């Protein structure tokens, strides 16, 4: 799927810009200024009138079309930017995306954004990324598209360098979204690996793909056990980006890539299964982030690992009561075949440890329990190293992607995954603290390496649209990972 929007820096004034539409911004609590004031003047005070009559308030993500020509442009869109004091990098992303999403409802080729007035470089970059994300929908397979990506985005800014990095971020988020949105019969372990190889080729990354033979030779028995019920063979993808020094130990990003999660013999009911193409979102987020880190040429070494399987119910499927020996030697009693993500990650994390990662982040749509705890918008963080978790949380806060840390008290939670017949079992005791017992399981495969786990089961995939993004894969946490990489070891 090729998706190429041109982005050009814009220097002409709004009324001299020939475009299918202009987007102009208004803060809720600040007077009309800049491009918006010019548009208002051209329309004889009509924008002022809309505000005075409370037709438009300038709240975040609010948009109102002005369907008349102004200057060289065919029409304009008013875009709310919220309260000026509350404006930040996350708001820049979402407000620009909301504007872009509204404009992309119709087919328009040239759109000029005049939102970025007095924004700092980070806000400009996020705004450009948001403009790319907002105009892409989830209708890969729909003849009549609901979103029409523009041919050209004109972006007015004083921070011209932010256009290039914003484009890189927006394209990475959209790569992740498109992969997540692709159905399970298109993206399965082998085809995901091919897509990763394309990214590697385009960005000069090293790539290794472990097939089922190599996985067996590498004793990845926990990962392979999940794949047994499927006609699709498993894969493990290892990407290496070497932007740092030769001996510098890498940052590892590990993603759960369950390309479809039926639950296995512990079968999910239909409603819960319907969206389970999203269960590869962790791996897709890893791939988007590694692409962006490489395109930005960050001066560090990064390893990206995707554990790729389909969790199905075929005749050879893993059974309840099976005992698996994971790559690191731990034995696992299977109590529920639907707790498969942790089995896949057990071996993928062990590979990251063996490759000498200094810090590990894993991303996984791991538990329904994290959604019960935090809802659909917030990812749960769990760690064996609080300062490393703080670094991840700080990066997320900086780019405006919500996260919240859950506790890992050993004296409370460690016992809950003990098994009568093996070292550990793949579920906790009952439903309580399900997100944490899953993380406690992962912790068994980390050794002494510093690790933070991101359970993004809620935010990775939206069932309903938000003003700034269509339903489906969100690409959320790609920008957090890039920010982590930028701040790493600084
Ligand atoms: N992929 C699911 C978790 C999930 C749920 C992701 C909802 C996205 C939306 C995971 O593999 C799973 O099935 N987890 C079980 C674990 C349980 C059996 C211990 C769950 O959360 O119910
Ligand atoms: Mn499952
Ligand atoms: Zn799953």
Image: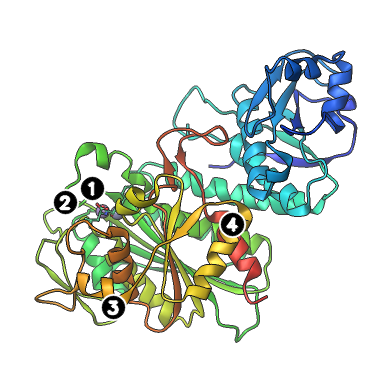
The disc, 2 or 4, on the residue closer to the chain's N-terminal end is 2
Give the secondary structure at mark 2.
loop
Question: Can I make out residue 220 in this image?
Answer: no
Disc 1 residue crowd, few under 14, some 14–19, many 20+, Cα 10 Å: many
Answer left or right for 289 relative to 228: right
Seen in the picture, residue 40 relative to 173 is either above or below; the reply is above
Give residue 415's position: percent from left, percent from top: 21, 74
Judging by the rendered image, the residue that carries numbered circle 4 is 397
The quadrant where ligand 3 appears is: bottom left
The answer to whether 171 is drawn above or below residue 34 in the figure is below
Reading the image, the residue beneath label 1 is 262
Image disc number at residue 478? none
| Label 1: which secondary element | loop
Mark 1 and mark 2: Cα distance apart in space: 8 Å
Element under disc 4: helix
Mark 2 lies on residue: 313
Disc assigned to residue 327: 3
Badge 3 density bin: few <14, some 14–19, many ≥20, Cα 10 Å: many
Q: Residues within 10 Å of mark 4 (few under 14, many from 20)?
A: some
């Amino acid at each position: 799927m090729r998706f190429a929007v041109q982005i050009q820096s814009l220097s002409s004034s709004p009324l001299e810009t020939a475009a299918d539409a202009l987007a102009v911004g208004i803060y809720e609590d600040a007077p009309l200024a800049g491009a918006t004031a010019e548009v208002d003047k051209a329309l004889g005070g009509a924008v002022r009138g809309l505000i005075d009559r409370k037709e438009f308030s300038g709240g975040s993500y609010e948009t109102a079309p002005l369907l008349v020509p102004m200057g060289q442009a065919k029409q304009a869109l008013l875009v709310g930017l919220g309260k000026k004091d509350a404006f930040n990098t996350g708001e820049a992303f979402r407000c620009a995306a909301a504007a872009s999403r509204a404009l992309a409802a119709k087919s328009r080729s040239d759109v000029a954004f005049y939102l970025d007035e007095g924004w700092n470089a980070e806000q400009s970059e996020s705004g450009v990324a948001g403009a790319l994300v907002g105009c892409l929908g989830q209708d890969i397979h729909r003849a009549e598209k609901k979103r029409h990506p523009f041919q050209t985005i004109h972006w007015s800014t004083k921070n011209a360098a932010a256009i290039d990095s914003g484009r890189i971020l927006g394209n990475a988020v959209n790569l992740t979204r498109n992969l997540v949105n692709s159905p399970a019969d298109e993206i399965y372990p082998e085809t995901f690996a091919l897509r990763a190889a394309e990214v590697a080729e385009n960005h000069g990354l090293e790539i290794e793909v472990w097939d089922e033979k190599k996985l067996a030779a590498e004793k990845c028995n926990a990962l392979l056990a999940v794949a047994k019920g499927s006609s699709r063979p498993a894969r493990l993808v290892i990407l290496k980006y070497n932007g740092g020094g030769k001996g510098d130990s890498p940052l590892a990003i590990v993603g759960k890539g369950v390309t479809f999660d039926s639950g296995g013999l512990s079968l999910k009911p239909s409603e819960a299964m319907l969206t389970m193409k999203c269960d590869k979102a962790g791996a897709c987020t890893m791939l988007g982030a590694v692409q962006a880190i490489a395109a930005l040429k960050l001066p560090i070494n990064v390893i990206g690992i995707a554990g790729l399987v389909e969790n199905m119910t075929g005749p050879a499927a893993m059974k309840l009561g099976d005992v698996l020996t994971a790559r690191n030697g731990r034995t696992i009693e299977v109590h529920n075949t639907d707790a498969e993500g942790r089995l896949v990650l057990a071996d993928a994390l062990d590979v990251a440890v063996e490759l000498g990662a200094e810090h590990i982040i894993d991303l996984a749509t791991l538990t329904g329990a994290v959604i019960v705890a935090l809802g659909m918008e917030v990812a749960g963080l769990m760690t064996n190293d609080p300062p490393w978790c703080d670094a991840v949380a700080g990066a997320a806060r900086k780019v405006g992607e919500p996260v919240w840390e859950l506790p890992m008290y050993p004296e409370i939670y460690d016992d809950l995954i003990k098994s009568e017949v093996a070292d550990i079992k793949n579920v906790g005791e009952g439903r309580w603290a399900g997100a944490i017992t899953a993380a406690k399981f992962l912790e068994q495969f980390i050794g002494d390496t510093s690790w933070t786990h991101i359970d993004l089961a809620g935010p990775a995939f939206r069932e309903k649209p938000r003003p700034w993004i269509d339903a489906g894969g969100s690409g959320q946490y790609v920008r957090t990972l890039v920010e982590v990489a930028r701040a790493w070891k600084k």
